[in-house]
Amino acid sequence: MSFIGKVVLITDASYGIGADTAFHLAKNLGASVPLTIVADVSNEAERIINETVEHFGQLNVLVNNTEIMMKGSGLQAPVSDFERSFDVNVRSVITRSVLLTKFSIPHLEKTKGNIVNITTIASLRTTPNIMTYYISKAALEQFTKCSAMDLSSKGITLNSIINPITRCTPVYETFGLNTEQAEKMLEEYKKRYPVGTVGDVYDTLAAISYLADDKSYSLLSGVLLPIDSTIA
């Protein structure tokens, strides 16, 4: 898909996956640098959408890159751990995504646009002793499926890209990992995955392009697309 002539809004694009995607897409769009809006998504979602549309005149794709990582625990964890996990991973992330999606609808309806949520493989896979985190993440995928159904009548598609591991980003600090430890962890992941590697920013861009293609893939909506280097 060519993004020439299209306007793509990416949240949490100051570092990591969001920053990589924003700069690569800006280059693909023919822009030297992307428009930067400094704001708190939780309180200023409407301003973010409005400033984008005022600057470019339209909106074609919204990328909800609002992942938050935190430690989780298993059945022996206190109830407070579950409450905190849902407060951070469900209430905070979904609220931000809901607000951005809500305010983007009138503009995306005009362009028959697309929404792409970037989430985590924790919603589909399991790992021992991290139940609180994984359960909370499963709720995000229902947000994708339910929203996709609600928006279908408006000609807007909504899908999720799951677990686009690109490189070590500051988000790993949430788990108490420094850069060296995070790099080591990714090297271990490569050994587990049948394809022998983890993804990079181009895999994320390819997935966004695939799901945001309003010509060839307009029938795809509510899809949870894993690009986590595993084989289902």
Image (tube, rainbow, N blue to C red):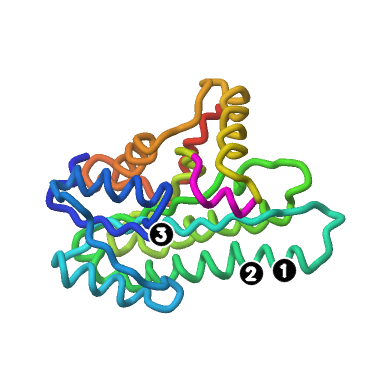
Q: 105 or 44, which lies in front?
A: 44
Q: Is residue 16 above or below residue 55?
A: above
Determine whether label 3 and label 2 are within 8 Å by CB: no
Disc 3 secondary structure class? loop
Which residue occupies 42% across, 73% down?
Answer: 40
Query: In the image, which residues are magenta?
Result: 168-175
Which residue occupies 33% across, 57% down?
Answer: 10
The residue pinned by badge 1 equals 83
Mark 3 or 2, nearer chain start: 3
Residue 210 in the magenta stretch? The answer is no
Question: In the image, residue 4 lies at what x, y percent?
Answer: 14, 47
- Residue type at the position of mark 1: Glu
Q: CA distance from mark 3 to mark 2?
A: 19 Å
- Residue type at the position of mark 2: Asp
With 100 as the anchor, is 111 left or right in this view?
A: left
Q: Is residue 76 above or below residue 81?
A: above
Residue 169 in the magenta stretch? The answer is yes
With 104 as the anchor, is 91 left or right in this view?
A: right
The residue pinned by badge 2 equals 87
Which residue occupies 72% across, 56% down?
Answer: 132
- Residue type at the position of mark 3: Asp
